[in-house]
Image (spheres, rainbow, N blue to C red):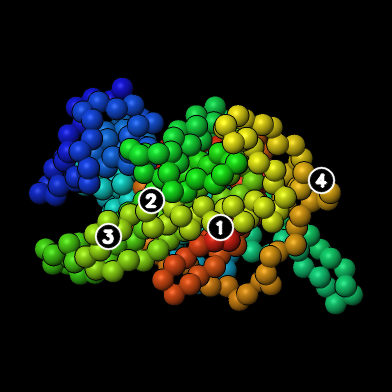
Amino acid sequence: MIDGITNSVTDSGFTITDDHVMPSAMSATEILARSSNVGTTKVAAMLGKQGLSHYLSAFGYGVTTSIDFPAQSSGILAASKDWHSIDMLTKPIGYGLAATPMQVLDAYMTIANGGKIVHPRLVSARIDAQGVRHQTVAQPGGRVVSKATASAVTEMLTHVVAPSPATGGSAAVPGYTVAGKTGTARQKTGNGADSFALAKLEATFVGFAPAENPRFAVIVVLDGQAGNVGFYGGSESGPLFSQVMAQTLRLNGVAPTRDPQGLSQSVTGPLVSGLAAAPTGPAVGAPSAPVKAPVKAPVKAPAHAADSKEVNSKVAKGKHRRVSTGRASRSHGASSTQSKPLQ
């Protein structure tokens, strides 16, 4: 248990608060499920500045992803030597740094992939002038955390997608166990004292399913209006995540992993890099839509960051929403559409 949790914490004149009154003592799982900002800063303090900086970098923040499309942003992550004391309060909850939705999704794909990095790609194969199909080979990634840690974090993330006081119940998908995290951030628009108070809110939900044997990872980012009240990742992005993930699992033939009473069932069928194998019949590999010209993923404040399976990814962007998905198939452990398969 982590005790001494108050409703706010102050450093260098800045105050971090929780939107709701939290218990004074919570486990790390409860802190994650309830989305406690103050509790998260206490977990980060256990890592220390060097530890937090190491894992942010190891999970891919501050560098472009391997998806390698034009004008991709690397986001913003300062070297730990340039951090101030306030950074140990802001960075753990997604402020003081910036990331694209693809970077955030990548981090969760690593969690789903048993702690090993999954390199996303826009194209699964190309066909040359002679009509010969050339499959894109997924490059193996390095290990960020152990499989045991990844499994523990995945289990923690399933407690987020649960009834209140957990924040992600709206992201649940009937018949499947979902692991994910809500996120709500303010988009700073200036440097004045009211820049955050007047800022637009941004609601995020990112997760993967089935949690027991991940096949797809999805991120949903919605832009709100200035001064929105009650505009949260759970209430706004969670329901859309649920719809997208449900359709993705159905269209790719992924059998339910739970019966109506929630009893776990095993899912069979190997995962192929970039492809999700259907329970019956050949692997499903055809994209659901033609590949469009690459779209630059806008920089955003992140919501906070199974063996060897890989997640494929796609990115779709709407006027006020951004949804990305990919295939997933593993789990991980740190405080965290189109669909991507995990491998």
Mark 4 and mark 3: Cα distance apart in space = 45 Å
Foreground residue among 98 and 244: 244
Residue 119 visible (yes or no): no
Frontmost of labels 1 and 3 is 1
Of the two numbered discs 3 and 2 on the same chain, state the one appearing first in sequence: 3
Label 2 sits on a secondary structure element that is helix
Specify the label residue 234 is tagged with: 2
Foreground residue among 280 and 286: 280
Q: Provide residue 159's location: percent of width, then percent of height.
A: 44, 35
Q: Which residue is mark 1?
A: 244
Q: Residue at x 72, y 61 (%)?
A: 124
Q: Are marks 4 and 3 in contact (CB under 8 Å)?
A: no
Q: So how many labels did they put on this image?
A: 4
Q: Amino acid at mark 1?
A: Val
Q: Provide residue 12's location: percent of width, then percent of height.
A: 12, 47
Specify the label residue 280 is tagged with: 4
